Every structure is written in structure tokens, then in C-alpha cells.
Amino acid sequence: MTSRYRGRFAPSPTGPLHRGSLVTALASYLDARAHGGKWLIRIEDLDEPRCLPGMAEDILDTLAAVGMRPDEPVSWQHRRVAHYQAAFDALDAQGLIYPCGCTRREIADSLANTRARHTTLAYPGTCRNGLQGKAPRAWRLRVPDGDAAIISFTDRWLGQQRQNLATEVGDFVLKRADGPWAYQLAVVVDDAEAGITDVVRGADLLDSTARQIYLQQCLKMPVPGYMHVPLVLAQDGEKLSKQNGAQPLDRSALLSELAWAARFLGLPMTSDSAATLERFYECAIAAWGQRWVTCSPA
Ligand code: GLU
């Protein structure tokens, strides 16, 4: 059976793979394999100060050690800036981009002055009609007003989603004057060019999805399917990360780390299903397929 499914895992090399990132990698890998599709890796290394030297290689080594090998060469965002510029130019040609000179403080102050308390912090569009003599700090994408601002999609894990870009997000940044391309633009350009049909990633990115769908619409790119899987939380209730004490995976117990990740994703794993890597993937792919790919009768 040939499948058109193409999925990916897109780590930022800011720290070694830990239990949280293993869960996301595993979910994307199992979904690709259960669909008989391709699985790719993209290293999201645009935010240079946060990327640690050698960390991308370390992550790739760990993925190989747990048996997750990509079907095509790994792609690196730092090599792809010409593509982000081309997409930016295409949006600019549609009149959708404007420079913004607001500082974070100015945005917060103007929201405090003009909006009722408890509204979400959408950029209020201060620079839509010009910089008023300020230097540009960033370039923003104009989002539509009214009903056109509502983006809806069905998340395979979380169900129906809806976000009003105008009231919940506002015109969003595509590039900073002093910094790299924004994640939102890079991810959309890269997913489209790699022909990604299904994005499986952590639930912390659910909130970014409407922005990405809007960018896909503006750039006439296909909209992939989305699935946002639960996050592994640290003791402070935040997403597990290097900052809140995530430990690198135990290299001497990778099979138990994998079995833990599979159980975290709700897959029934018996003790013999993690006897070898081969056995683990056989069981985990079958269990994932049964839950998320084959429609089992109610
Ligand atoms: N680079 C992002 C992260 O490490 C993931 C981006 C994505 O999957 O869209 O959290």
C-alpha cells in the first residue's frame, strides 16, 4: 500500500532529548508508521542564542538510538532563510505586511488603556497606519477583521478548535529587525515545502495553529492535518524543559523510556512489549493504529 502521508518531528536544539520531547517524537513517528507514510526530522535552529552547539547532533543520535530514523535527509532551518524571505516577499506583495515600532511595554500599556480587563493580549494594531517616526522593531502580518478572522480546524486529539485572530492574537510578527525569522513563518514554509500532510506535536503549539493556517491560506499552501498531543509537565505544572529540571533520557534504559512514553500517550503496553526495540515498535505502531488510524466499531 502506498501512502501519501508525510509527517515530521521538529525539535529546537536547546537541550538534549528528554521525556517530554521523546513523547512528541514518538507520537509523530508512530502516526507516520501506522499510516504507512514517511517520517522526517527538521532541526529548528533559527533562534541562535537559545540553540546549544552540538545539541542537534545529540538529539539525532538519541533518536537513532531509540530506533527513530528519518526517511529523508534531516533539514536545518538555518540553511533555509532564502525560502522565508521569498514567502515574506509574497505576503508583502499582497500588502499584508507592515513595520511595527512598538516595544513590549508600549503594547502592554496601550492594551491596559484601551481594553477592558480580562481581554486577551492581542496586538492592538498601533502601527497599522504608519510608524509615526519610530524605528521599525519588527514586521507584522495584518490579520483580517470580522468573521474572516475566525479560523476553525479539527484537531485529531483535541477535537474542534476555533480562534479569532483579530481579538485573540492581533497582527503577528513574522520577523524582528534585530533577529531571526519568526517560528510561525518558518514552520509554515518548511512544512509546505516538505509536503507534510500531518503535523503531530505538543499541545503547547495548539495556540499557534490558527496563525499557521492563516499563513497557509495567504500563501496558497495546503493545510495539513493537526494533532496536538498532551504535554509532559514538570513539578511546577509547566511544560517539561531544561529550565525546569528535565533530565536527559537514561541512555542505559532506552526501552523503558520508550515504554513510559507510549503509556503516557495512552497506549496499552504489556511488559513483554518492550523486550526489544523491534517488538516495542511492532506493538506500539499496532496500538497507535488501532486507536488513531483504523476506525474501530463503537
Ligand atoms: N520546534 C518546536 C519545538 O521544539 C516544534 C515546532 C513544531 O512542531 O511545529 O517545540
Image (cartoon, rainbow, N blue to C red):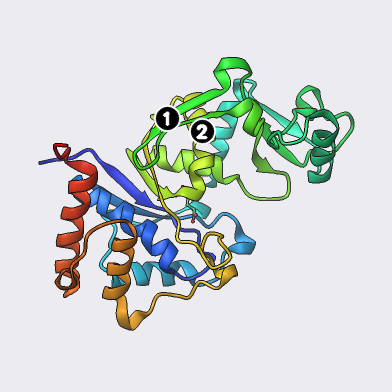
Q: Is residue 196 visible?
A: no
Q: Nearer the viewer, residue 147 or 75?
A: 147
Residue 55: x %, y % from top left: 49, 70
Q: CA distance from mark 1 to mark 2?
A: 8 Å
Q: Nearer the viewer, residue 291 or 293?
A: 291
Q: Is residue 97 left or right of residue 46?
A: right
Residue 123: x %, y % from top left: 72, 33
Residues packed near mark 1 inside 10 Å, few (<14), some (14 to 19) or many (20 plus): some
Q: Is residue 7 left or right of residue 169?
A: left
List the single residue furthest toward the bottom.
Answer: 252
Q: Is residue 32 left or right of residue 170?
A: left
To which residue does mark 1 refer? 153
**Residue drawn at (36%, 58%), measured in percent from left and top?**
25
To which residue does mark 2 refer? 210
Residue 119: x %, y % from top left: 71, 33
Where residue 260 sits, quadrant-wise, is bottom left
Q: Earlier in the sequence, mark 1 or mark 2?
A: 1
Residues packed near mark 2 inside 10 Å, few (<14), some (14 to 19) or many (20 plus): many
Q: Secondary structure at mark 1?
A: strand
**Numbered mark located on residue 292 in the image:** none
Q: Is residue 25 left or right of residue 101?
A: left
Residue type at the position of mark 2: Ala
The reply to whether dot 1 and dot 2 touch (C-beta < 8 Å) is yes
Q: Secondary structure at mark 2?
A: helix
**Residue drawn at (14%, 61%), measured in percent from left and top?**
282
